[in-house]
Image: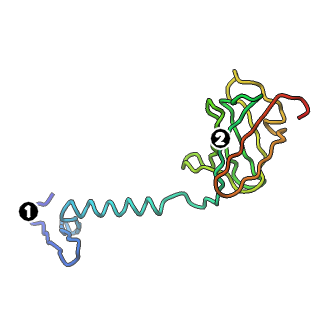
Amino acid sequence: MIAAGDRWAKNTQRSISFITLTHAGREMRLLENMTELAIGLTAVALLCTVGCGPANVPPLGLVTGTVTFNGKPLPNAEVLFNPSGGRMSFGATDSEGAYRLTYIETQQIYGALPGTHRVAIGVLADNGPKLPARYSGPTSTLTADVKRGSQVIDWKLDDTVGK
């Protein structure tokens, strides 16, 4: 609040004009109009959008696909791609057995590191089929080669013994 005895001055020497208030020996500079404020805030928002994105994300391969078990889509399954070094990627199948791998969930970054991955597929719901150990967990024998760019990696699983 400006009180009696406070000093104010208008500064129009720059393209953006400020009002300088002096109160109790302190100076405060305020933008003169709301248009300039809106432009300033928009510029800050754009800089944060461009400059505050995900840092240090390596090149990825976008991986999508379908998981079937005994010829039928496998819903509610978790698909894990684990490279020999680096962050694991994961996905979950929908009702049609389709999945998309996610690299960093909190930032919605999709894909997997290029290279060879150990793959594990497990059913999330208790009412789904029990998959053989060769497909899930640490005993999985599944592998996949991920390349840069988009690719489809489908999984045709079955319960045949010895396969």
> Which residue occupies the foreground of this view, 29 or 14?
14
Q: Secondary structure at mark 2?
A: strand
Q: Quadrant of residue 16?
A: bottom left
In contact (CB < 8 Å): disc 1 and disc 2: no
Question: What's under tag 2, amino acid-wise?
Answer: Gly
> Which residue occupies the foreground of this view, 74 or 109?
74
Which mark's residue is nearer the viewer, 1 or 2?
Answer: 2
| Residue beneath the point at 37% across and 62% down | 44
Determine the CA span between mark 1 and mark 2. 66 Å
Q: Quadrant of residue 74?
A: top right
- Residue 46 drawn at (x, y percent): 39, 61
Residue 2 horizontal side relative to residue 146, left or right: left
Q: Which residue is mark 1?
A: 4
| Residue beneath the point at 22% across and 61% down | 35
Give above or below for 146 relative to 120: below
Binning the other alpha carbons within 10 Å of mark 1 as few (below 14), some (14 to 19) or many (20 upward) gives few
Screen quadrant of the C terminus: top right
Q: Which residue is mark 2?
A: 91
- Residue 79 drawn at (x, y percent): 70, 39
Disc on res. 160? none
Q: How many marks?
A: 2
Q: Secondary structure at mark 1?
A: loop
- Residue 65 drawn at (x, y percent): 67, 42
Question: What's under tag 1, amino acid-wise?
Answer: Ala
Residue 15 horizontal side relative to residue 161, left or right: left
Mark 1 vs 2, N-terminal side: 1
- Residue 40 drawn at (x, y percent): 30, 64
| Residue beneath the point at 13% across and 69% down | 7
Give above or below for 16 relative to 68: below
Give above or below for 113 relative to 128: below
